[in-house]
Image (cartoon, helix red, strand yellow):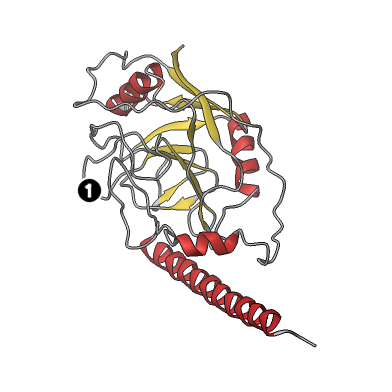
Amino acid sequence: MVSQEQRRRQLAREKFLRQQQRRTEARRKARIRNAVIASVLGVVLVGSGALYATGALEQDDDKANANAEVSPSAPPTSKAPDPCDKPAKGEVESQTWKKEPAMSIDKSAKYTMTLDTTCGAIDVALKASAAPHTVNSFAFLAEKGYFDHSKCHRLTTNGIYVLQCGDPTGTGTGGPGYTIPDENLKDESLKDNVYPAGTVAMANTGQKDSGGSQFFLVYQDSPLPPSYTPFGTVSEAGMKVLKKIADAGESTGAGDGAPNATVVIDKATVTKS
């Protein structure tokens, strides 16, 4: 015979499960809604300090939900193995500057940016002559160790196909404290409002000249208006690294979220060749 205390616990457990199911369903609907919003807008890319969309980067701050998800009664979930290595030891340094760094690069020279990530090295041939302010800024930030130990915080797998990095806070709202002008928006590679696979371009807030430190790497041709400074091209070996990251998917299942792979920039360097 079931005791009164056992019955009370059973009812409480059933109530908890119902609440958890409602919360899970609400989050699922919100993710679908946000995916539709992102699809309609075409892209949601952010620069230094502001979000360029309505609700597309919502965070779940409900502590009760967080507690419910780690409850032993929550159903287990399966996840593909992480294809990337553990991050190197070290922490992101919080650094900001009041103004864009003085021009120090040779606009006529060739520069390469290397992102040594937990998933492999990504080499980028930089377009110094076409986007000098952008390349100069990246050379400055890389020398200061600004990108070191930072996560690539966003992967899109629906509508557009990009990996977004460059925010030391990992939130999608961080920046270096200054902005740089838009450049090279008439690059010959940008045809029919498509950023081809291999393009590296600046994220921004949707406003003119609002780029900061965040950038995105295109791993598959993506329909985008020519509003994001293209300043580099990923090497063939780097594209294989991007494909590995993309194949691991993103966290929400709706096509826009944090990468399932642990993508951390252990070290970023810009070298003159």
Q: Is residue 269 above or below residue 187?
A: above
Considering depth in this image, is 178 or 272 the residue closer to the camera?
178
Q: Residue furthest right?
A: 1
Position in image of residue 52 (x %, y %): 30, 54
Residue occupying the point 37% across, 20% down: 139
Measuring from the top left, give residue 268's x and y in whole percent: 47, 23
Residue drawn where x is 31% and y is 28% of the image: 134
Q: Quadrant of residue 235?
A: top right
Q: Secondary structure at mark 1?
A: loop
Instruction: Give the residue pinned by disc 1.
Output: 207
| Residue 83 spot, x, y in % from top left | 69, 40
**Residue 187, picture quadrant:** top left
Residue 108: horizontal and vertical position, in percent? 34, 15
Residue 72 figure quarter: bottom right
User: Considering depth in this image, is 149 or 237 the residue closer to the camera?
Assistant: 149
Task: Please name whichever residue, 159 or 143, is drawn nearer the observer in this view of the structure.
Answer: 143
On screen, residue 154 versus residue 41, left or right, reads right
The residue under the point 29% across, 24% down is 132
Nearest the camera: 264 or 246? 264
User: What kind of residue is marked 1?
Assistant: Gln
Estimate how packed mark 1 is, as few (under 14), some (14 to 19) or many (20 or more) residues with alpha carbons within 10 Å.
few
Check the image and report above or below for 28 versus 199: below
Of the 4 image quadrants, the one containing the N terminus is bottom right
Count up the numbered dots: 1
